[in-house]
Image (tube, coloured by chain):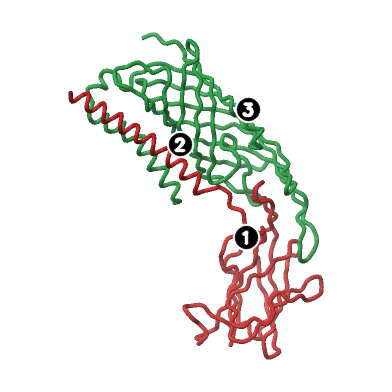
Chain colours: A red, B green
Amino acid sequence: MTFIKRAKASRSLQKAATALIMLLTLAMAACDNGTDCNINNVSYNRIQLYSVGESENIVDGVYSYPDTLTVKLMINGRDSIVANRLVGASELQLPVSYTNECDTLVFEYSDGIDDTLYVEHSNIPYFVSTDCGMAMFHHVTGLRHTRNLIDSAAINEPLINFDWHENIKLYIVE
Amino acid sequence: MKISNYILLSSLLLILLPCTINAQEKKSEEKEGTFAFKGISLSTDIFGYMSSFLDDGMSGEVAIEANLGNRFFPIVEAGYGSIDITDENFGIHYKSAAPYMRAGLNYNFSYQEGKTLRPNYVYGALRFGCSKMKYDVSSPPLHDPIWGGEVPYSFSDVNGFASWIELGVGVSAKIWKNFRMGWCVRYKARVNATKSKNSKIGYIPGFGTNRHTRFGATYSLIYEIPFKK
């Protein structure tokens, strides 16, 4: 009798395991379509602004530049505005050239002062997948800048790709 | 670790749980042959040849499987997968051909103690697979939408390696004498896939298109080698 009971219990457990595996398989299929494409396949250089010293414009650890800030990109000898008269800017996401090895960014402040930041980089054409296509990633190799309101600039994460991380830390004197 | 990985591990435990319980409860039966060798079978997967119609490469595969006590079926699968596609949306050309291998276990859910192997039975499948490959990938030049200019893209003989696990449910049915046929639906979860400086792997032989997870299937023709006790 004990043997029969054990055999029945074992079979019930096996059937339950089968049903559970089938259910879990279906559930996993429903939860994950497996693709991880970026929306527009463009990678951006993420620049985070910081103040030099203490500032009343730091909220929850995030510094916001209090005045207006205009950012221009030098494109083939001409300037092009990519951010116009931002107020309270804390982070900038800027495109990067596919073919140049140095991009020139001009920061115009409210009182007519400006700074220029030179971002030196290499370019990495990248096959993401047949589902998602191609992308251009970059590797920041160096930074140079003028010193009107920019105190210093540092490379935080040199690889510019789809990952959400700070690439450059920019320290501003208020 | 992703939630799906936890689910996979849980499912693995569920498969092994009945084995553990029985192992504890019936040590005496081991003497009678819970893991007794009952025979070997050879099989080939037919579904892999047809999957090229699904834009998912083509593969040929053979397997050798041992029958231990009509309950546990350790199995090794070896195959060769290839793909040569040009994507319609992006114009990307991807080409690769490489061998792959899987090893694992089938567990007979229809097992009944003291009885011979049923003509038809349902089983759970667990596999670990891996493949080392080389691939060529090229695309139309990348156009810079802001600065202008183009960057060519073409790389050949890029090295890659990928591994994955599979969890599945299948059916095996006797069709004639020592021949069986069977299908198995499998959920595949990628464990790792290397990246080169300029590309990810696009196609993993034995796994399919390189994604986190995939579904796969096999439809096998099986020959049981006659075995005398």
Q: In the rendered structure, the residue with mark 2 lies on which chain?
A: B
B140 on left or right of A164: right
Residue under the point 73% across and 41% down: B86
B54 on left or right of B182: right
As drawn, the label of residue A161 is 1
Q: Nearer the viewer, residue B163 or A90?
A: A90
Q: Nearer the viewer, residue A136 or A67?
A: A67
* Marks 1/2: CA–CA distance: 33 Å
- Please identify the residue farthest to the left as the structure is shown: A1
What residue would you read off at disc 2?
B167
Foreground mark, 1 or 2?
2
Label total for image: 3
Q: Nearer the viewer, residue B9 or A53?
A: B9
Q: Quadrant of residue B19?
A: top left
Task: Please provide percent x and percent y for residue B193.
Answer: 56, 45
Residues at discs 1 and 3 in contact (Cβ within 8 Å): no
Task: Please provide percent x and percent y for residue A47.
Answer: 61, 72
Residues at discs 3 and 2 in contact (Cβ within 8 Å): no
Q: Which amino acid type is shown beneath numbered disc 1? A: Asn
Q: Is disc 1 in the same subunit as disc 2?
A: no
A39 on left or right of B116: right
First of labels 3, 2 by sequence position: 3
Q: In the rendered structure, the residue with mark 1 lies on which chain?
A: A
Q: Which amino acid type is shown beneath numbered disc 2? A: Leu
Foreground mark, 1 or 3?
3
Task: Please provide percent x and percent y for residue B201.
Answer: 62, 44
Eyeballing the image, is B26 above or below A64? above
Q: Secondary structure at mark 3?
A: helix
As drawn, the label of residue B49 is 3
